[in-house]
Every structure is written in C-alpha cells, then in structure tokens.
Amino acid sequence: MILLILATILLISGLVTANVFLVAVVKVHARSGTDLTDYVSASNVHRTVQQARRGYILDRNGTIIAQDNVTYNIIAILDKNRQSRKGEIAYVDDPLATARALAPILGMEESTLYGYLTKNAKQVELGSKGRNLPRETKEAIEALDLNGIEFVQTTKRSYPLGTFASYLIGFAQADDDGEVSGRMGIEQYMNAALSGEDGYKRYQADKNGNILPGMKMEEKSAVNGNDVILTLDQGIQEALETAFMQTQAEFNPEKVWGSVMEVETGKILAWGQSPSFDPNTMDIDDYVNYVSQMPYEPGSTMKVFTYAAAIDSGAYDGSVLVDSSRFCYAATNRKPYRVSQGDSRKIGCIGNASGKSWGMIPYDLGLVYSSNVVTASIITNLIEPSVYEEYLDRFGFFKLVDTDGIAESTGVKNFTWPADKLALTYGQGSTVTMLQMIQAYSAIFNDGTMVKPYVIDQVRSSYDDQNVLYQGQTQVVGNPISVETSKQVQQLMYDTANREDGTARFYQIPETTIIAKTGTTQLAAVGGGGYSTGKTIVSLMAAMPAEDPKVLVYYAFQADYDKNAHVKSDAI
C-alpha cells in the first residue's frame, strides 16, 4: 500500500507537474577549570543547572523529526583579576590577537570581535555568531589555547530531515534567557508535553570551588520532556515534498499544498506546502499553514458534495437527461431557476469550462465531464438550495475541524444571493480549507462515516517507550450520507478517473485503480468584481484502491492558467 501511495503522489506531481506533487546548561567548560562568578568573598553559593532534554518528535516508524543537539556559546572573560587555580592568566589579555584568531572560525570581522573584547565588562558574549556552536567549532577554538575564552554548554533544537512538513512541525527556539519553547506548529501546540524540567546542584564552596566542611549539596535531577509520535510517514511525506519541487519546476506556481490521509482512521500520513522552509536555518517568509489556515475556492472537487446531497436526499436519478448548454437564470425570493438566454427575467448565466456543451446528457455524466451547468441544475431541478446547504453543514464545511490544536480558518460561506447558491455547487464564491476537504471526503470514501483528521498518534515517556501518556484515537464526527450514497458517489468518481472521456483519466496509474475528481477554479480578481482570467487553482482529490478506498491524496497549486494542467503527463 505504501508503494502505491508513493506512486500516486509522484504521479499526481507528474500530472499536476510534468502535470503537477535554555536556560543554558551552566556547566561552564572553562579552560581554567574555574567557575565564572566573581570571587567577592571567601565563600560562595554555587549553583549549576542540569538541563532537561526536550522530547523528540518522531514519525510513525520512529524516524526522528525534531531533537535537541548540544551546542556551545563563547564567553570571553575580560576581568583582569581573574586567574585560574594554578595562578595562570584566565582573561583575554591580548584582545587584538584573540580577535584575529577567532575571526575566520566564527565568520566575523576582526573589528567587530575587537569591539566585544575591549568592552568595559567582566565578561561578554560574542554576538549571534558566537552562539550555538557545534562541537567541532568549539574544539577548533580550544586548540588555539586563547586566554579567557571559555564555553557554556547549551542546547539547540535541530531537525534532521530539514524541510519536512515544516509548517506542521513548526520550530522551537531559545529566548533571551536561554529557555527553549515551541514557537510554531506541533512544537508550539505540544510544548507542555515536549518540555522538561531542569535540574540543579547547589552548594556552598570557597573561592576555589571546594565544598565547605559541614555543608550539604542540594540536588534535583532534571526531568526530560516526553516524546511525541506523529501519524506522518517519512517516505510518503518525502514523496510529497518531491512532488512540490516537481510542480515548482513545471508550473512555477505561487503556492502548492497537499495532504495524504487514511480514510478509515483519519491519520494524516503527509501534510505540506511550498514554498516551505528549513527549521534549521529559519528561511521563512510566510507563516500561514496552507492546509489548515488558507481558505480558497475549491472548484470542481466540490461538485462531489452536490451530487452526494442529491443522491442521499432521494431526489437523484442519474439516467435522467439534463441540458448541459449555457445556463441562464432568474430568481424568486433569492431562489434561482433556469430561463432561456433571451428571457427578460434573466439575471445571469453560467457556462462550463472552456464554453463546452454536450447537449442533453445524463446527470451521471455531469460529474464525469465536470459540468458546472449540471451541478447548478441539481439545485434548481432536483433539490432545494437549503437542502444542499444542510448537507454542506453535515460535511463540516465553514467551521473548525479542531485537529490537535492546529491553527486553522473556517472559510467563508456565501449563500445569500442566487449567484452565490449556484456558484457553490461547483466550488466557487465560497471558501473552504484543505483540512475541511479531507475530513468531508472521508465520508465519501468511508461508507458515509466521516472521521476527524489527526496527526498526534502518541505521547509517551522519554524514559520508557511502553509508558504511553496519550494515545490518539479515530474520532467519528458524523455520518452525513448513507453507505449506499457513498458507494454511488464512489462509482461516479471511478468513472471520472477511468472512463476514456473522464476528466481525471490522466491520473490513472498501473499499480492500482483509483477514483478521483479534478478541480480548476479561477481566482477572485484583486479588488473584487469577478474572477481573474490569468490565475487558477488546480487540484485533485484521489483515493485508492478504487474497490475499497483506504487512502486519499489531495493536491493543489495556484499558478498562471494552463489549460493542460490536468493533461500533461510524466510516467513516474
């Protein structure tokens, strides 16, 4: 199944590409072996911090996505009264030579370093380039044997997989006090679970660090944070990230976003977008999570729900013929009805993509051909607009999905005017999120049972893998349609993907049979007043295997209009 998912994602990317797929640990490693505190009296209270480890974030197979790495900050001792226990110089006695030695290693200007090293202070840090140094850099500096240059061990959050579901994972950073906390994504949502509690040792000693007679050491062990295991699958996620790059190369899109989910459980296997960022380097410009926070007009992938509403309400006979030519309409009490093009009551007209018309066709072929006119006819001929609106509510549109605390938007429903009602039957005029779409489609693919998408599989103790503190569960959030309706809609989507004249036929793959629905929608014009003719959102919803769908793949990108976006193919 995993191979089939990977093949499908890469095919989608090919088609929807080639078509478009601290507190710092104050364990000071001083070359001199002394503590950094002033020798202000014969005895001092010493306190060292034992830093807790922040929990790992892992994929479902145990691959590390986020972890703590030990790093080092440089401390330059400028106090000329500072000496080591052996009486050696333990301060920066030659600022110019020290600056010259450190500059090439730290990638800093000598003058900048010299400025730090000649400040009127007892000790200084050397700016951002003197922080979070890897062990190799620390050892290279230690080899220079520079007086007064010491290190504080710290922790930096690292992300071994780099750009990998970055807007979902987020990132954690240290504040000015060295305290690491989540600032975005799961790192932020699960901060309480991931964060540990630092330990310490406290004792009274003389100026040379010797514990005074009769003094007890007070000690508290650090408690590491818990590990968070996600439903993500590294292989599937990396296939999705690869698809994004292929789409970027083929279409130069402004945005690409996609997700993969188990339809029976709601487990998210992949989630991402492009442009993205590497949390190790923080090359981030946009903080919006496209999957959950970006409302957009979904286009023809919405037609499936128009059909589902008509079928489930008992008003549908797919063999009945309907006129697929240009649809002009009038309205009474804001309820639209069809009129001839020359009718004086006409207030607007609807056409199919590229102005196509197939004459009189069965309602079933309206979905296979992705006809705007036929879906508009469903709410004028078969069901009331209010019935369609009720089904959209059942499917969870225009409200929060509430997935594991992930930030999200609700989208906007425009269903007041006749034009709004007709447009929503084919996915325009109102906005939804991808998160809402994959939740709603779970009912289509899962015999009418709608499940909530989720990404947190487990929280478990970092000391004992068997100690599971939280276990994610499949959550059924509704049964908007019957089993029979689900099967009938699946058959229509099968025809859409597998008939020679189906609009999703170019997405067929040899490894398995899929069911699918394509979407292409124009973007609203900047400043309002209609739609742009130059920009579109191209999308695909697919599920596999066709005979018993287990996994859905939803992929979308926003780019300049390309009439062949669903036709271009690459045999990946």
Image: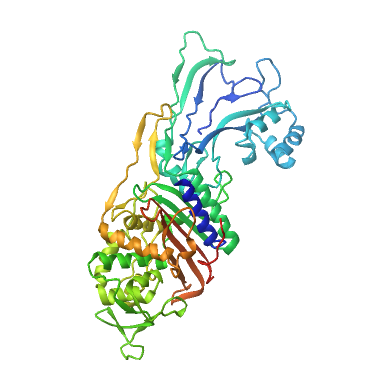
Q: What is the basis of the colouring in this image?
A: rainbow
Q: Residue furthest top?
A: 213
Q: Is residue 165 visible?
A: no
Q: Position of residue 35 (x, y in %)?
A: 59, 22
Looking at the image, residue 188 lies above or below residue 28: below
Q: Between residue 174 and residue 185, name the one nearer to us.
A: 185
The image shows residue 443, relative to residue 415, as above or below, that is above
Residue placed most toward the observer, 315 or 248: 315
Q: Nearer the viewer, residue 133 or 338?
A: 338
State which quarter of the image contains the C terminus: bottom right
Position of residue 378 relative to residue 440, above or below, is below
Q: Quadrant of residue 519 in the image?
A: bottom left
Identify the residue at horizontal 48%, vertical 66% (top origin).
537
Whether residue 229 appears in this view of the structure is yes
Which residue is pictured at 37% across the width and 53% down the height? Answer: 549
Relative placement, left or right, of 347 versus 233 is left
**Residue 29 coordinates in the image, percent (x, y):** 61, 24
Name the quadrant containing residue 493.
Answer: bottom left
Kindly identify the residue that appears in the image at 53 percent across and 51 percent down.
Answer: 241
Q: Which residue is depicted at the point 27% across and 64% down?
A: 391
Residue 247 in percent (x, y) is at 56, 59
Q: Position of residue 137 (x, y in %)?
A: 67, 33
How many marks are shown on the rendered structure? 0
